[in-house]
Image (cartoon, rainbow, N blue to C red):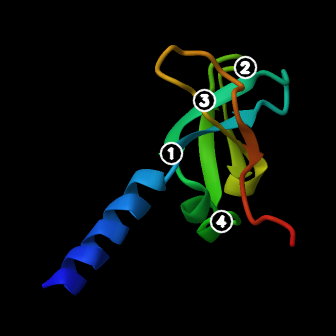
Amino acid sequence: MLVIYYFALIRTRELREVCMLDLYFQCPRSGSVIASGIRTDDASIQRVAQLPVSVFCPWCKQNHRMRVCDGQLIDVPESGVTKVKRRRAGPTKA
């Protein structure tokens, strides 16, 4: 019984440590930041880094087709302050 509790406790800690970040892109025309509406974690982004994604740009009023790894993962706290933590989306170099 103690072993099951121990693994449940470890799993709970792992779930709490997952950092969810917002995926943003840069408009190729205006250079403005585009919110994709995608909220994810580093591990998930790395698995789908090469997949295409289509995002609508409110600045130039066009859809842009990019790869997930072209985006930036940004931590946006509840206060709405941006650019606290920036990470390139996609696989990290070893």
Q: Are marks 2 and 3 in contact (CB under 8 Å)?
A: no
Dot label at residue 20? 1
Three-letter amino acid code at the position of disc 4: Gln
Location of mark 2 (residue)? 60
The percent coordinates of residue 71 (x first, y second) are 72, 45
Dot label at residue 46? 4
Mark 4 burial class by Cα count in 10 Å: few <14, some 14-19, many 20+: some
Q: Is residue 26 left or right of residue 54?
A: right
Look at discs 4 and 1 and give the one toward the viewer: 1
Three-letter amino acid code at the position of disc 3: Ala
- Of labels 2 and 3, earlier in sequence is 3
Q: CA distance from mark 1 to mark 3?
A: 15 Å
Q: CA distance from mark 1 to mark 2?
A: 28 Å
Q: CA distance from mark 4 to mark 1?
A: 13 Å
Q: Are marks 3 and 4 in contact (CB under 8 Å)?
A: no
Dot label at residue 48? none
Q: Is residue 82 above or below residue 43?
A: above
Q: Is residue 38 left or right of residue 5?
A: right
Q: Are marks 4 and 1 in contact (CB under 8 Å)?
A: no
The percent coordinates of residue 39 (x first, y second) are 49, 43
- Of labels 1 and 2, earlier in sequence is 1
Q: Are marks 1 and 2 in contact (CB under 8 Å)?
A: no
Residue at 67 percent across and 28 percent down: it is: 34
Mark 2 burial class by Cα count in 10 Å: few <14, some 14-19, many 20+: some
- Of labels 4 and 1, earlier in sequence is 1
Q: Name the secondary structure under disc 1.
A: loop
Location of the C terminus by quadrant is bottom right
Location of mark 3 (residue)? 35
Three-letter amino acid code at the position of disc 1: Met
Residue at 70 percent across and 35 percent down: it is: 85
Q: CA distance from mark 3 to mark 4?
A: 19 Å
